[in-house]
Image (cartoon, helix red, strand yellow):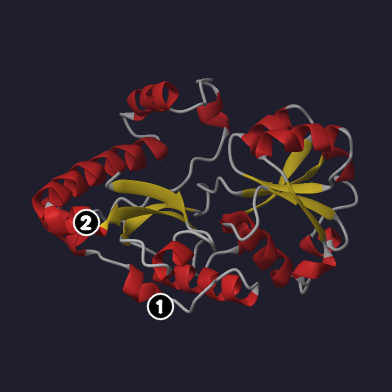
Amino acid sequence: MPLRQVCWKGDYPVNAFARGLPIRVTMARTRDMPGFSSDTLVVRDDLRASVRSLKDIKGLRIAINARAAVLEYMVAKMLASAGIAFNQVETTYMPWPDMGTAFANKAIDAGAVVEPFAEIFDRRKLAFPFRRAADVLREPPLEVSVILYSKRWIDHDPDQVTAFTVAYLKAVRDYYNAMRGGPKRAEVVDILMKYTSLKDRSAYDNIQWSYMDPNAELSIASLKDQLDWYKSRGAIEKNVNVASMIDTRFLDRALRKLGRVSVK
């Protein structure tokens, strides 16, 4: 497939690039910003009184969906902001849906989740949103996922790549406006309900939407910081320079065609 959109994680695309797979990071997909921060550390509901600050997380059992993934990095950065080392909590790994049962059985104390699980667990009084990624990771903001293009596609059909990038950026701007309560919000929610697993219309008013930059520009500082952390965990097979993975030529062309959006 010519297009991939993935979470930025230790074993892929970094290790895939190091192995010589013909891929390039071309533009941003989602990140966490204040008010638009889907990635969330939730805490079991009966611990509300005892867990009030990040320092209270020390020693707890935290569930994460995957090793060497962006939410593991998020948890580590949250802990570090309170002076807690990653090995000073107990971690377990499980899919997000399974965390609901684990909370109910008191098998875990906290979990790193995305929306709509933060809202679902809160509504069911299983766990409450304790800290959003954007509450802690501000400079730089957490770059969660990126768009990858196949280098073969880039090399063999650059005109098609440019046309796709322009179309994608137009769609991102529709989402951006809807995310902020614009006039196309209902239309965008219809599309999301059709093509994603979140079918409850009311949920879109209760969750925090993931932030999408209307100019699709990458937070290079965030990607570099994540890479450094994955290296410290031994998750990176070979030394990779982030800049060598990035090709923004087609985004630059799209921005010249469409113009830039002023982000407040």
Q: Which residue appears at 85% of the width and 60% of the height?
A: 56
User: Where, quadrant-wise, is the C terminus in this rendering?
Assistant: bottom left
Image check: 46 left or right of 254?
right
Residue 62 place in picture, x, y as percent: 78, 52
Q: Quadrant of residue 203?
A: top right
- Badge 1 vs badge 2, beta-carbon distance below 8 Å: no
Crowd tier of the residue under label 2, counting other residues whose Cα lies within 10 Å: few below 14, some 14–19, many 20 or above: few
Residue 191 place in picture, x, y as percent: 36, 25
Residue 76 place in picture, x, y as percent: 68, 65
Front one among 183 and 30: 30
Residue 163 place in picture, x, y as percent: 13, 46
Crowd tier of the residue under label 1, counting other residues whose Cα lies within 10 Å: few below 14, some 14–19, many 20 or above: few
Label 2 amino acid? Answer: Arg
Which comes before the other along the chain, label 1 or label 2? 2
Query: Is residue 48 in sight in this rendering?
Result: yes
Q: Secondary structure at mark 2?
A: helix
Query: Is residue 260 in sight in this rendering?
Result: no
Q: Which residue appears at 31% of the width and 29% of the height?
A: 183
Label 1 amino acid? Answer: Asn
Disc 1 and disc 2: Cα gap in Å?
A: 21 Å
Q: Find disc 1 in the rendering and name its residue.
A: 241
- How many labels, in total? 2
Q: Which residue appears at 71% of the width and 28% of the height?
A: 123
Front one among 73 and 13: 13
Q: Which residue appears at 27% of the width and 47% of the height?
A: 2
**Can you say whether 230 is above or below 56 in the image?**
below
**Can you say whether 102 is above or below 109 in the image?**
above
Q: Indicate which disc residue 65 carries.
A: none
Q: Find disc 2 in the rendering and name its residue.
A: 152
Front of the two marks 1 and 2:
2
**Can you say whether 227 is above or below 204 in the image?**
below
